[in-house]
Structures are given as structure tokens and as C-alpha cells.
Amino acid sequence: MINVKDLHKNFGTVEVLKGINLDVDAGEVVAIIGPSGSGKSTLLRCLNLLETPTSGEIVFEGNVLNDKRTNINQHRQKMGMVFQSFNLFPHKNVLDNLTMTPQLLKKGSKTELEAVALGLLNKVGLEEKASSYPSQLSGGQKQRVAIARALAMNPDVMLFDEPTSALDPEVVGDVLGVMKNLAREGMTMVVVTHEMGFAREVADRVIFMDKGIVQEEGPPEQLFGNPQNERTQSFLSKVL
Ligand code: ADP
Ligand code: MG
């Protein structure tokens, strides 16, 4: 579904991504771990061209995204993104947060889109919050709304950038639970996370990034149980 080939990203003279190769298959859950500043967010943002790659290629469903002739908006709609900081529309209630963009893009009638949105809210356990405003929700609830909002676009892949890092510990499990269910349903997911338990339990493959390079990757049992790279070992000894 996604093929990243020799991706480089510079900010000014600083090379943040130094040749990333990454393939994500349909239905696969890939967790990206690594120290702060290693380029995880930059990589995720390059995947849907929130950042423009300096060089290399990003192929999504057979289309080279970073080609001037590609209509990026069309493909971006197929990539849901969830950030650490929710980014809900503050002046719209929860239901409108879910229906606004699909409505703008004429994905269906208002009634149809609202029915879909209520179904998604039910899925994330927040149907009763449909008419609440973001300011009336806890961080965990906001993040579950953000996930439902991304799903309302009917994406083929969901990208998560540390979705639980800004949350109080007692609500982290609710959000991870929603993500776990999504994974079980077969959603293709790329998840940057510090939740090693989640990565171990849910990911099909774990990628360890450091200094702008994929230092090691493998199934969770292998990467957590028997890391080969010295940097992976050192990182895991600090976080596990
Ligand atoms: P991570 O998500 O792994 O913590 P990031 O991808 O956010 O790492 O950042 C990697 C490096 O790129 C950091 O040194 C950061 O300061 C730098 N960086 C990220 N975004 C920008 C930007 N827009 N302008 C300049 N430097 C940036
Ligand atoms: Mg980051």
C-alpha cells in the first residue's frame, strides 16, 4: 500500500531523514519507535506530504505522491491522520467535526453522513457526546473523536503520531483500545508511539528509528526480545 524509497528530508542544512526505505502492506500495523528528535514525525508527515520530501519517492496505492502531476488532495483523503494534539474544530460540535469535511467534499447527503458519523462515534464509545463541543470533552474523549473524524473520510490507511502522549495516564487505555479494535478489523496503520506494550501486542512489525535512519525493524517478538542493533538495545533498555 505504501512504498517509501530512499526518502531524504532536509530542514535548511540539517538532514533529518537520511534515506528511509519502508513498505507497508494492506492490513498491516507498523509501529515506529525511537528517541525524540530521530525523525519519526517528519517521516509520518512526509507520508501524506504535510512535509515535502527533499528527495526519494513515496508511492501510495501505486501513485507517486511526490510527483508534481499527482493530485495529492485526492490521495491524502485516503490517509487518515491523528496527531498528539487532537486538532478538533473548537466551534463545531462532535457530530459536525465528523461530518464537516466529508460534506464539503460531497461524500454523501447530510443524513447519510450523520448516520455514518453516529456509527463511528458508537464505535469509539462516544455516541452520547454527538452534540457536545470539544471543550466539554476530556483529552481521551477528544482523541477518540479525532480518530472517528479521520475514519469518517473512509481512509485506506491511518497514520498516528504519538496519539496518547498528551493524555492523562488513566485515559490512555481507552484510546489504545479503540486503536486495537481498528487493527483487529484489518485497518492498515502506521503508529508512532512510546507505548511499547501496544507496539508489542498490536504491531505486525516494529521499526526502530534513530538519527534519521531505520536502524532496525522486525516482528515485535524479535525487536523487543532479541534486538540486534546496539542503538536499539540501548533505547529499549531505557524505555522498557
Ligand atoms: P521525532 O518525531 O522523532 O521526535 P521530528 O521528526 O519531530 O522527530 O524531528 C526530527 C528533527 O527535525 C528534530 O531535530 C527537529 O528539531 C527537526 N525538525 C522537525 N520539523 C522541523 C521544521 N519544520 N523545521 C526545522 N527543523 C525541524
Ligand atoms: Mg514526533
Image (spheres, helix red, strand yellow):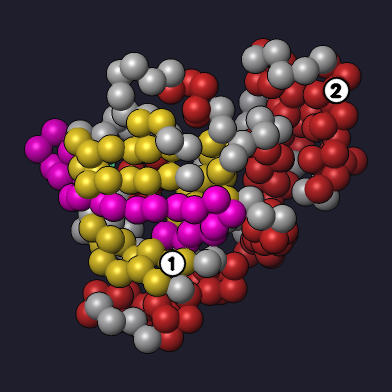
List the single residue furthest toward the bottom. 226
The CA distance from mark 1 to mark 2 is: 38 Å
- Is 19 magenta? The answer is yes
**Looking at the image, can residue 197 be seen?**
yes
Which residue is pictured at 59% across the width and 40% down the height? 156
Which residue is pictured at 80% across the width and 32% down the height? 117
Q: Position of residue 145 (x, y in %)?
A: 71, 40
Is residue 28 left or right of 212 when viewed as pictured?
right
Q: Is mark 2 within 8 Å of ligand 2?
A: no
- Is 22 magenta? The answer is yes
Say which mark, if any, is on residue 40.
none
Compared to residue 53, the image places residue 31 above or below, namely below
Which residue is pictured at 56% across the width and 44% down the height? 158
Q: Earlier in the sequence, mark 1 or mark 2?
A: 2
Q: Position of residue 113 (x, y in %)?
A: 80, 24
**Looking at the image, can residue 178 be seen?**
no
Q: Position of residue 219 (x, y in %)?
A: 45, 73
Q: Which residue is tagged 1?
A: 206
Say which mark, if any, is on residue 112.
2
Q: Nearer the viewer, residue 118 or 187?
A: 187
- The kind of secondary structure the magenta stretch mainly shows is strand
Start and end of the magenta stretch? 9-33
Tag 2 secondary structure: helix
